[in-house]
Amino acid sequence: MNICVFAILFLTGFQYGSASLEKAECLFYEDPYEGYVCELHLTNPNGLDNFAAITGTHLAGFGNDDVVRVERNVASYTTNIPTIICDTFRNLKNFDFSHDFIAEISATSFRSCSALEIVALSENNIQRLSADAFRFNPNLWMVYLTYNSITDLPANLFTSLPSLRYVMLDGNALTVIHADTFGVRPSFTNFYLNRNSISAFDERLVDNTGLRSIEFTGNSCASVDVMDETPNRDDIRAALAVCFNNYSDRRY
């Protein structure tokens, strides 16, 4: 009996001890180029999304609405992007949480960040992106997702982004690029796909976007970098001809 009681108390104490490790705390500072910044120390190894608040002391004259950039503190460890970040900093424009352990971008990760312009999540462990990951971010124009574990870009991922120009996906595990990920997106010009395993590419992406520059070295169907100013993007079409020929309309 005593052994059982001890085991229950030990396990209960361990659970409470683990919960006490979770924290979300900002070191606020003003950057002459970036504006008002929260350097966020986020300890969330279990990927919880139940934070009540982000703590930290603002500089005099500043508040949550003045924060335009959130960046990762070097000691952070999180496997997700809690909604408390965008719920707290509604005017956030730049989110940089590269070099962490984030595994997923969900439909709620950036839901309240309507002013967001840049997302940088390179060198995490991202495997899944919700099709609605950026649905509520119409001002987003640059997305860094390099060196993750992404195998697929869902349909409609970028279709709600009228200002999108740059997408960086170097060093992932992509095998096929589908046009329905982007839809009709004339603003989109620069695509970085080096060091994936791409064997097929939907040519309609070139037709439906303003793509002018593609970095594509180290892929299966082609290994090229192309900057193309021709009216019909003939140089890109020639460089990726094998990839286009390999493409099937079937997504899965």
Image (cartoon, rainbow, N blue to C red):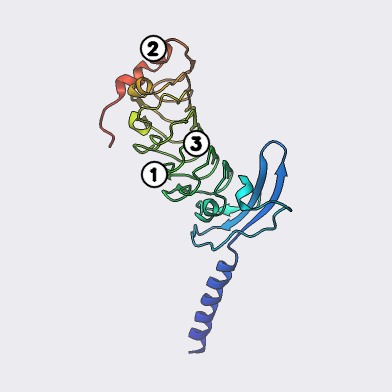
- Is residue 71 among what the camera can see? no
Check disc 2 and report the residue beneath it.
232
The amino acid at mark 3 is Leu
> Label 3's element?
loop
State the image coordinates of residue 21 (x, y, percent, origin top left): 60, 64
Determine the image quadrant of residue 151.
Answer: top left
Check disc 3 and report the residue beneath it.
140
Q: Calculate the distance from the C-alpha at mark 2 to the C-alpha at mark 3.
A: 26 Å
Q: Calculate the distance from the C-alpha at mark 3 to the C-alpha at mark 1.
A: 13 Å
- Mark 2 or mark 3, whichever is nearer to me: 3
**Residue at figure coordinates x 67%, y 45% from the top left:** 36
Determine the image quadrant of residue 130.
Answer: top left
In the rendered image, which quarter contains the C terminus?
top left
Asked if 226 appears above or below 86 in the picture, the reply is above
Q: Calculate the distance from the C-alpha at mark 1 to the C-alpha at mark 2.
A: 31 Å
The amino acid at mark 2 is Asn
> Label 2's element?
loop
